[in-house]
Image (tube, helix red, strand yellow):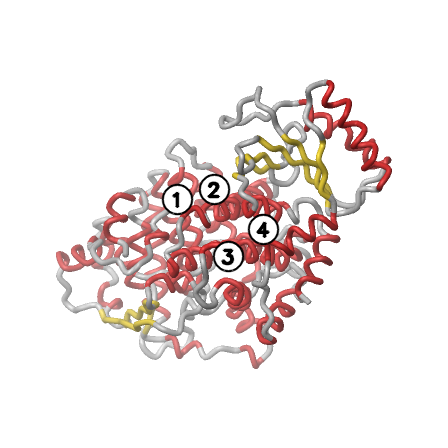
Amino acid sequence: MIERAIENWLTSTNERGYEIPFCQYLISEGYTILGISFHGQVEQGKDIIALNKNGTPCAFQLKSGNINQRVWNNIKSEIDDLLEMPIKHPKVDKQSKRECFLVTNGIINDKLKKDIVDRNVGLRKRKLPDLKIYDGPELLSKFIRVNGTFLPTKPPDLKVFLELLMSDGHELPDKRLLSRFLESVLFTKRETEPQLRRKIASSILLNQYVMEPYESQKNHIALIEGWVILYSLVLGVVEKFQLAERNWAQSLKIVLDKINYQLSALKEEFFSRTDYLEGTWDGALFYKSRLTTVIGWLAAFELCMKSTDANYTIDRRVYDSVKKFYGSETWFWGESATPLFIMMSKLAIAFGDTFLSNKIICDLIIDIVFKNGLQEESALPAPYYSVKQIINHFYGPTDEKMDLSSFSGESYHLAVLVDILVRRNRRDLLNEVWKGLTNIYNSEFMPKPSWAILRWQCDEGESMGFPFKKPQSWKELQKDAWDMNNLDLPKSLANPFCYYFLVCYPHRLNRHTGKLLDSLLNKKVLATKLQ
């Protein structure tokens, strides 16, 4: 059933829709991916450049649909560039022999195939590479072969798969459902390394398939979240089975490239517009929640890029947007929004704007203290509740109302925010709100084992909590906030991807991951502290 669904997807998607699965197929065949030109950014006819398992440079041009003589005439100049222009990459000798491929998910007609064979004779005389071809039927067989026997077959998993396919691509994905489906592929009984590699390959293909509705709508946030979830779950597989890097590093590299491309596209679209309303129905909490989400994700993108490359110049337009929109046009709807605002605060710090950065953190603390005080009837929901659920509480039918009073007297993120101000040595700011802080119980759930934090839902773990003391020793607060010993986190989170992970997984923000965010640049220290 899912194989037939993959066939239907492959024949209907465009070339960018199957680009990531095709890269994963190449990885499975021993190729090393050197570069991908996402969404039209093609250089000299080359969508993908790679080294095959023998070290031979290879260039691939991807197309969609059937290719007949008319289509060939339209793309001939690109094919000529593919064949005649050397591959430009630091790891490729321009003088070395190379292989060139034309790939399509449609059919290349028989006459054109024969013409290509004849044309290759002339190319050899000119000492140019042959043009090799993959078309739809061969591409489908390769994708199915990569998946092997790791497709989900149990009725509950198939039901989830069908639910995911019903999306029209306009809203955000159901992250719980998507995680459950991908886990049905990735997390089964212990397997051999080759089998785990194939499971990872299978999950990439299937994730691309269920993300197709969001691709067609250019729903950047949905695509970012979908691929961040996959990346996180693959890290979970790596940690659980202690999988050697050779089995997963390339796969996660192309997934991260996809995430960063989508964030770059989101930034381009955001700054190309002056009006952020969507249709005549938009406004109020819909508008504010969307603007908060976009700015928070863009802040995370800039922070991740800077943490990855010290020479990266953070885009000042994102910081200017935080200054412009924060407060009047953003919305702290509940603790699932906390990571978005922390990213805004950290971006302000990057530009030396300590006032705005501290104001953002203080405003969150005041909001939690004021709204989640004991016996409050309009408390802020816990981070397990999405913005969609909270908007439905205000605008939806009666059966979607939540009992907000059930969240009073408790917070999952207050201690994280207090730690941030303590690490910034802002005792003066905390003095102003300390009395209210002591009325809130600080809750925390730590999944067990530590790698399970990378899963969306974990039933095993330790629930912990504490109230702040009254009076409270400042030295004790400082010791706790700076203590990097015994961080109960997997090592794979000690990298810039953590910015994306916490925005996508707000219920995984706790004092441990909060310390991690403030320590990402000190990777040597983290490597000794994480399990």
Residue 318: give its label.
Answer: 2
Q: What is the CA distance from the residue labelled 1 to the residue labelled 4? A: 21 Å
Q: Amino acid type of disc 3?
A: Leu
Dot 2 falls on a residue whose secondary structure is: helix
> What's the residue at 45%, 62% (across, down)?
191
- Dot 4 alpha-carbon crowd within 10 angstroms: few under 14, some 14 to 19, many 20 or more: many
Which mark is nearer the camera, 1 or 4? 4
Q: Name the residue tied to disc 3.
A: 230
Q: What is the CA distance from the residue labelled 2 to the residue labelled 1? A: 8 Å
Q: Name the residue tied to disc 1.
A: 347
Which mark is nearer the camera, 3 or 2? 3
Does residue 126 sit above or below 204 in this rendering?
above
Q: What is the CA distance from the residue labelled 4 to the residue labelled 3? A: 16 Å
Question: Nearer the N terminus, badge 2 or badge 4?
Answer: 4
Question: Nearer the N terminus, badge 1 or badge 4?
Answer: 4
**Whole-percent x, y for residue 199 in the image:** 52, 58
Q: Amino acid type of disc 1?
A: Leu
Q: What is the CA distance from the residue labelled 1 to the residue labelled 3? A: 26 Å
Give 425 or 232, whichever is nearer the viewer: 232
Left/right of residue 204 with respect to residue 501 in the rendered view: right
Give the quarter of the figure containing the C terminus.
bottom left
**Whole-percent x, y for residue 230 in the image:** 50, 57
Dot 4 falls on a residue whose secondary structure is: helix
Quarter of the view holding residue 273:
top right
- Dot 2 alpha-carbon crowd within 10 angstroms: few under 14, some 14 to 19, many 20 or more: many
